[in-house]
């Protein structure tokens, strides 16, 4: 179970450190594609819910999504379409699970812009390890550069580890997601359909 391995990897085994975890979920139009008898968004919802059940109670979690409000007919606006739909809070696993069920895939894939905006989601006052779990079925489609964004954030003092999950991805997407993870000392995981 790919997602369960990720959660086991990113959450502290004992209380050596406090970890805040933000999920960034791809809701671009390609998530409507059917794979293994289900749409990829249905599979992604299941994967997210499974992972939430394995995060220790009291962990601060959040959900940001992209591509969920604006159709691909408006690329300019769709490429700015990212939203923190469930802000950080302890014990909000049910809120995240309920929220992901209300969202449908529509637009483009602004990975770089979403990573840039995620900085504002984490509390500057909390002393905690900052972790992002990014699930995507495609590469950046908005001319952004995720590595350049991460480099800029790092230079500005924002340290985050990004673990990436490639959801039925092609080679180009896998490479980009691997690069994102490697740059932040995170891990890449390859998920195939309903096996997550």
Image (cartoon, grey):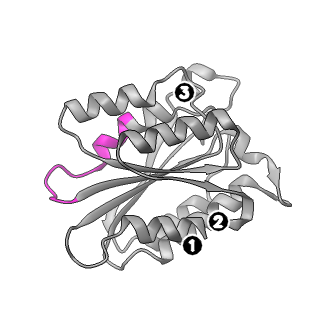
Q: Quadrant of the C terminus?
A: bottom right
For the view shown, which residue lies furthest in the right direction? 37
Answer whether residue 38 is magenta in the image: no
Q: Which mark is residue 79?
A: 3
Q: What whole-number distance in Å separates the C-alpha atoms at marks 2 and 1?
A: 9 Å
Question: Which circle's residue, 1 or 3, is located before the other in the chain?
Answer: 1
Q: Is residue 124 magenta?
A: yes
> Would you identify the image quadrant in which residue 130 lies?
bottom left
**Mark whose residue sits in front, 3 or 2:** 2
Q: Label 1, secondary structure: give it.
A: helix
- Marks 3 and 2, the one that precedes in the sequence: 3
Q: Is residue 28 above or below residue 161?
A: above
Label ID, residue 50: 1
Residue drawn at x 64%, y 38% is 138
Residue indicated by mark 2: 196
Residue at 64% x, 32% y is: 172
- As helix, strand or loop, the secondary structure at mark 3 comes to loop
Q: Is residue 107 visible?
A: no
Q: CA distance from mark 1 to mark 3?
A: 29 Å
Q: Are marks 2 and 1 in contact (CB under 8 Å)?
A: yes
Could you say which is closer to the camera, residue 109 or residue 17? 17
Q: Are marks 3 and 2 in contact (CB under 8 Å)?
A: no
């Amino acid at each position: 179970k790919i997602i369960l391995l990720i959660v086991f990897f990113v959450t502290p085994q004992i209380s050596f450190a406090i970890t805040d975890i933000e999920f960034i979920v791809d809701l671009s139009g390609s998530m409507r594609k059917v794979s293994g008898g289900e749409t990829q968004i249905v599979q992604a919802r299941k994967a997210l819910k499974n992972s939430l059940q394995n995060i220790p109670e009291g962990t601060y979690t959040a959900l940001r999504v992209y591509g969920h409000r604006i159709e691909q007919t408006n690329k300019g606006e769709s490429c700015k379409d990212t939203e923190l739909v469930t802000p950080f809070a302890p014990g909000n696993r049910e809120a995240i699970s309920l929220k992901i069920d209300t969202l449908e895939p529509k637009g483009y894939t602004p990975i770089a812009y979403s990573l840039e905006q995620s900085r504002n989601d984490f509390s500057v006052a909390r002393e905690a390890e900052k972790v992002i779990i990014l699930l995507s079925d495609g590469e950046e489609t908005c001319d952004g550069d995720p590595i350049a964004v991460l480099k800029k954030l790092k230079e500005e003092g924002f340290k985050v580890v990004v673990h990436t999950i490639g959801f039925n991805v092609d080679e180009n997407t896998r490479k980009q997601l691997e690069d994102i993870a490697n740059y932040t000392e995170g891990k890449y995981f390859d998920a195939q359909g309903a096996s997550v």
